[in-house]
Image (cartoon, helix red, strand yellow):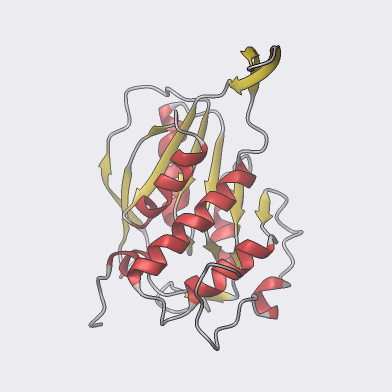
Amino acid sequence: MPGEPTHEDAAVTEPASTLDRDASGWPQLHVSRHPAVLHKLAVLRDERTEPKKFREVVRELSWLLGYEALADVEVRPIPVTTPLETMDGHELADRIGLVPILRAGLGMVDAMLELMPTAQVWHLGLFRDERTLRPVEYYNKLPDSATVDLCLILDPMLATGGSATAAIDVLKRWGASRIKLINLIAAPEGVDAVTHAHPDVTLYCAAIDRQLNERGYILPGLGDAGDRQFGTGLSD
């Protein structure tokens, strides 16, 4: 793709095992097939992609997936005066809330704010217990009651689905009426968990991968999204 450096021998299309996975069993799931998404996802997966480039591509993919996820938000008419005349325009009617899951979800926020500059941002801190693979909540700064019409949960990876399901539970208790989940890569196990627990939540992702390994990592995946964004865990 012009203007974007790629590794000379890196594939720029998704392997058949992920690109051709049938998502028809999950009506709430939308898997992007946009060529720009497929190209950037291959760069993101490559183990040689350094943190700076990795963060850039996370941001670019988030923008593209967010664009698709926001296609059905409500708008209301407003008058707009151009240099030549007055016409009917539109502005957002829905109040949008962005809920990045700390810490990996932070890399997706700026792209979403470019799309929706008036969006509110609320952070949820969840980490996965490496022994039980269950989510543990350690940070929650949501206000007392829901202040938005649509919540977008941002997390690069949907692995076991535990953190996503827990985040949705929190937002529903908060009073959120519409929730969407945006991930870069999802595992079938995670999609099953979220859609079973919350069939009213819509999911958007760039790829569904093959499976989880015994440590709960997505295969083929891209490794730990937080470590790769922030340059940590490099000595492991």
**Quarter of the image holding residue 142?**
top left
| Residue at 39 percent of width and 76 percent of height | 215
Query: Quick check: 185 above or below 103?
Result: below
Locate residue 170, reporting x and y percent.
40, 38
Query: Quick check: 210 above or below 170?
Result: below
Query: Quick check: 183 above or below 222?
Result: above
Residue 183 visible in image: no
Horizontal side, residue 204 vs residue 54: left or right: right
Number of dots carrying numbers? 0
If the image is split into quadrants, where does the C terminus sit? bottom left
Locate residue 20, reporting x and y percent.
73, 72
The front one of 191 and 79 is 79
| Residue at 43 percent of width and 51 percent of height | 108
The front one of 104 and 177 is 104
Locate residue 171, reporting x and y percent.
44, 35
| Residue at 43 percent of width and 31 percent of height | 173
Horizontal side, residue 129 vs residue 116: left or right: left
If the image is split into quadrants, where does the N terminus sit? bottom right
Query: Quick check: 229 above or below 63?
Result: below
Locate residue 102, reporting x and y percent.
32, 51
View extreme (bottom): residue: 9
**Quarter of the image holding residue 87?**
top right
Horizontal side, residue 155 vs residue 30: left or right: left
Residue 180 visible in image: yes
